[in-house]
Image (cartoon, helix red, strand yellow):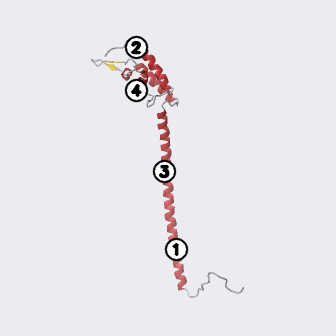
């Protein structure tokens, strides 16, 4: 793999810093996120430059832009800790999580209401059945009694 010249490296670092500033201001490209992949694409460099390298002997050395990746992550985390929302998708995810929580709470409350109303209906039907049974018992008792006079339902009776 060919090494880049110092001038190219400085040029790329400038492009990375400019892209970093844009992303951290929330100027995300369509379909992009506030991450290293989008940073590399916006700066026009390969993403591998942000990660440490291993030589054939297994020794690790820092990537040419690893310090910028660390700075980017540090600045992004500082913004997140401060409450700033950089990535609109993150804000949408948080909004949907909050909405989901609210809907779950409403569902629990609605289920409790349904349970209460079902119990109320059961008690009401039971009471109606008991009242009906009492009315039927009283009607049968009325039919068997000989000293009870039945009054007419619809008109006046007696002297006017």
Within 10 Å of disc 4 (Cα), the crowding (few <14, some 14-19, many 20+) is: some
Cα distance in 3D space between marks 4 and 2: 20 Å
Quadrant where the N terminus sits is top left
Q: Do labels 4 and 3 touch, CB within 8 Å?
A: no
In the picture of the structure, the residue carrying the numbered disc 3 is: 108
* Residue furthest out toward the bottom: 146
Nearer-N-terminus badge (4/1): 4
Q: Do labels 2 and 3 touch, CB within 8 Å?
A: no
Cα distance in 3D space between marks 1 and 2: 96 Å
In the picture of the structure, the residue carrying the numbered disc 1 is: 132
Q: Is residue 154 left or right of residue 59?
A: right
Question: In the image, which is nearer the foreground, mark 4 or mark 1?
Answer: 4
Please state the horizontal and vertical placement of residue 99, each as a whole percent of the image: 50, 43
Say which element carries label 4.
helix
Cα distance in 3D space between marks 3 and 1: 36 Å
Within 10 Å of disc 3 (Cα), the crowding (few <14, some 14-19, many 20+) is: few
Please state the horizontal and vertical placement of residue 138, each as a whole percent of the image: 54, 79
Question: In the image, which is nearer the foreground, mark 4 or mark 3?
Answer: 4
Nearer-N-terminus badge (1/2): 2
User: In the rendering, which numbered label is found on residue 37?
Assistant: 4
In the picture of the structure, the residue carrying the numbered disc 2 is: 8
């Amino acid at each position: 793999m060919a090494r880049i010249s110092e001038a190219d490296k400085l040029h790329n670092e400038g492009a990375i810093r400019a892209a970093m500033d844009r992303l951290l201001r929330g100027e995300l490209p369509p379909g992009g996120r506030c991450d290293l992949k989008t940073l590399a694409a916006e700066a026009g460099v390969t993403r591998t430059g942000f990660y440490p390298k291993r030589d054939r002997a297994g020794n690790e050395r820092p990537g040419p832009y690893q310090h910028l990746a660390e700075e980017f992550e540090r600045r992004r985390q500082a913004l997140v800790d401060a409450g700033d929302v950089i990535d609109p998708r993150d804000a949408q995810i948080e909004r949907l999580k909050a909405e989901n929580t609210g809907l779950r709470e409403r569902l629990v409350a609605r289920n409790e209401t349904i349970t209460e109303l079902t119990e109320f209906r059961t008690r009401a039907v039971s009471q109606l059945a008991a009242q009906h049974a009492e009315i039927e018992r009283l009607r049968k008792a009325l039919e068997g009694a000989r000293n009870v006079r039945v009054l007419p339902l619809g008109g006046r009776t007696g002297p006017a």
